[in-house]
Amino acid sequence: MSSDPWGRVDETGTVYVRTADGEQVVGSWQAGTPEEALAYFERKYEGLVVEIGLLERRVKTTDLSAKDATTAIDHLRQQVDEHHAVGDLEALRKRLDALVSTVESRREERKAQKAKQSDEARQSKEKLVVEAEELAASEQWRAAGERLRALVDIWKGLPRLDRKTDDELWHRFSHARSAFSKRRKAHFASLDAQREESRKAKEKLVAEAEALSGSTDWGATAARYRELMTDWKAAGRAQREHEDDLWNRFRGAQDVFFQARGEVFAERDAEQRENLTRKEELAIEAEKLLPVTDLKAARAAFRAINERWEAIGHVPRDARPKIEGRMHAVERAIQDAEEAEWRRTNPEARARAAGLTGQLQDAVDKLQKQIDAARAAGNDAKADKLGRELEGRKALLDQALKGLEEFGG
């Protein structure tokens, strides 16, 4: 018979293992010596030790699921319980029990972690739903649309929740996206309709602008082009594919008209500048008539100059007041000379002036005599009153005398 601390082989070749509950039959060995029998079953024990060690490392260092770990533990426990190995089987049971505790602890940790992740995922999805519902009312069509697409990608990257919760949140999320898409579609449909109206309106403006491009009614046509531009701005934008073409046609028609007008005006401006030079020469010639010494000659000369002036034509608008003012000044000076000559040579006016002067002189002489008489009589109050009246009559007499001098008398 052969034995070691954990097993023995009896004389019949039966192999036993020692346990806390006493010896347990391991198996029967008939092929060799008892020592070989013990060695064989001890190797089976070492095999179990290795397998349990490998499972312990897998549980600690990999993401082995609790279910798979439990299956593996049960398989090893069955082998230990079947006593087909010689060794400290109780130690193996204790290691397996500890491993069960580790797996259960890992299971609870993962369950808690999963619950935490699920709660975080639920909160994240609720935030996505709230943001999507806010964006559903936005009119920032491009930015809101891009953000909603980004939210979908974020949603796809989050873990699924329980079916009920996940479905409810997805329904709200999807409804918000649909509401935004519906509003955006309606907006752009309305915008398309408006742009079509704008296109039709601008087509009419272009047609009129092109029809006017050959006009030579410069003032009225330029004014109408300004009105057309105001109408163009008020018409709004047409579709992008039409807007640029319409604008190029509209602007091109105006350019044709204004280029033609510019050429005509440039020619006219050159002619008017030449007219201004000629009128400045006539103004200098007219100004040499002043001061008037020979009224008849001055009047005839000015009339001849003015006839040449009228034949010349227009000058630049900004120069017109100054050059015409110079001619008017000469004309007024000649008219003033004519009026002075008329007053000087008018017999009736001279007679009226002389008669008024005589009457005033008689009144002055009469008042002076009355004053002298009042002074002689000692009536100073009367003399003072008559003196004030005398001063007024003398002032009138002075004016009458000056008027009489204008008539050479």
Image: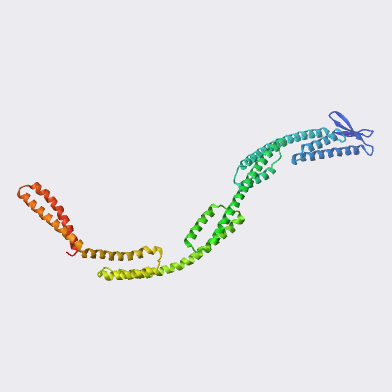
When the figure is inspected, residue 59 is found, relative to residue 375, above or below; the finding is: above
**Which of the image's four quarters has the C terminus?**
bottom left
Location of residue 206 by image quarter: bottom right
Work out whether residue 406 can be spotted: no
Task: Farthest residue to the front: give it.
Answer: 348
State left or right for residue 54 relative to residue 389.
Answer: right
x and y percent of residue 3 in the render? 89, 34
- Relative to 168, residue 228 above or below: below
- Pinpoint residue 375: horizontal percent, then vertical percent: 6, 50
Relative side of 350 to 150, left or right: left
Q: Residue 346: horizontal and vertical position, in percent? A: 21, 64
To which quarter of the image does residue 105 belong?
Answer: top right
Residue at 31%, 69% in the rendered image: 302
- Relative to 247, say whether 112 is above or below: above
User: Closer to the camera, 34 or 127?
Assistant: 127
Instruction: Give the tally of numbered discs.
Output: 0
Q: Which residue is located at x 66 percent, y 43 percent?
A: 178
Q: Position of residue 378 (x, y in %)?
A: 5, 47
Q: Is residue 102 left or right of residue 298?
A: right
- Image quadrant containing the N terminus: top right
Name the one closer to the observer, 374 or 320: 374
In the image, taking residue 211 as reference, residue 113 lies left or right, namely right
Q: Residue at x 67, y 40 (%)?
A: 175
The colour scheme is: rainbow
Q: Nearer the viewer, residue 287 or 102?
A: 287
Q: Quadrant of residue 277?
A: bottom left
The residue drawn where x is 52% and y is 56% is: 228
Q: Residue furthest top?
A: 21
